[in-house]
Image: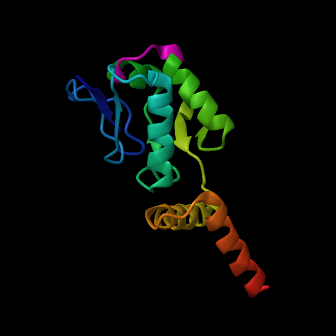
Amino acid sequence: MVDSITLSDPGAAGDASRGPGGARVAGTVLAVNPASAEPPFRQLKSQIVEAVNNGQLTTGTRLPPVRTLAAEVGVATATAAKVYRELEEAGVLEGRGRSGTFVAAADLPAAVLARAAEEFAKRAVGAGFDVDEAVAAVRNVFNRLR
């Protein structure tokens, strides 16, 4: 069984009409799989990071309060708070006091570079190259462009 939460629209606070399926935010679903060997903390943290990196959660998107996230995903409040705290420290999220927790402004050039690197790495692995060969290819292009 997978417990999940669908995050609600930015700026939407709690919605008493929502059912056990969770709250809606930007169409992203965070789910904790109790059968997974990965701890719920890591599952939630990696899902939020992935959603931000993929553009599913954009700058300024408001996340549910810690207690709401914890209750609807089925984890301890301390677990949800730790996820938010670590992602704030990493610059992925930003806490705005009583206003809530939001997706932080992205470093757009870094995000573009990361996405290009991921695409390149997938193609290199798919073609059977190892990391040393892939890095050497990038280094050669850099040297040629200088």
The location of residue 58, given as percent across then percent down, is 47, 53
Give the magenta range: 73-78
Quadrant housing the C terminus: bottom right
Q: Tell me the residue at 46%/27% (across/down).
A: 65
x and y percentages locating residue 35 in the rendered image: 32, 20
Quarter of the image with the N terminus in it: top left
- Of 41 and 13, nearer the camera is 41
Is 132 rendered above or below residue 37?
A: below
Q: Picture quarter containing residue 75?
A: top left
Vertical side of 17 occupied by 8: above or below = below
119 shown above or below 67: below
Please say whether residue 109 is visible from this viewpoint. no
Specify whether residue 74 is painted magenta. yes
Image coordinates of residue 52 in percent, x first then y, are 49, 49
| Coloration of the structure image | rainbow
| Residue at horizontal 38 percent and vertical 33 percent from the top | 13
Q: How many numbered tags mark residues here?
A: 0
Residue at 72% x, 78% y is 140
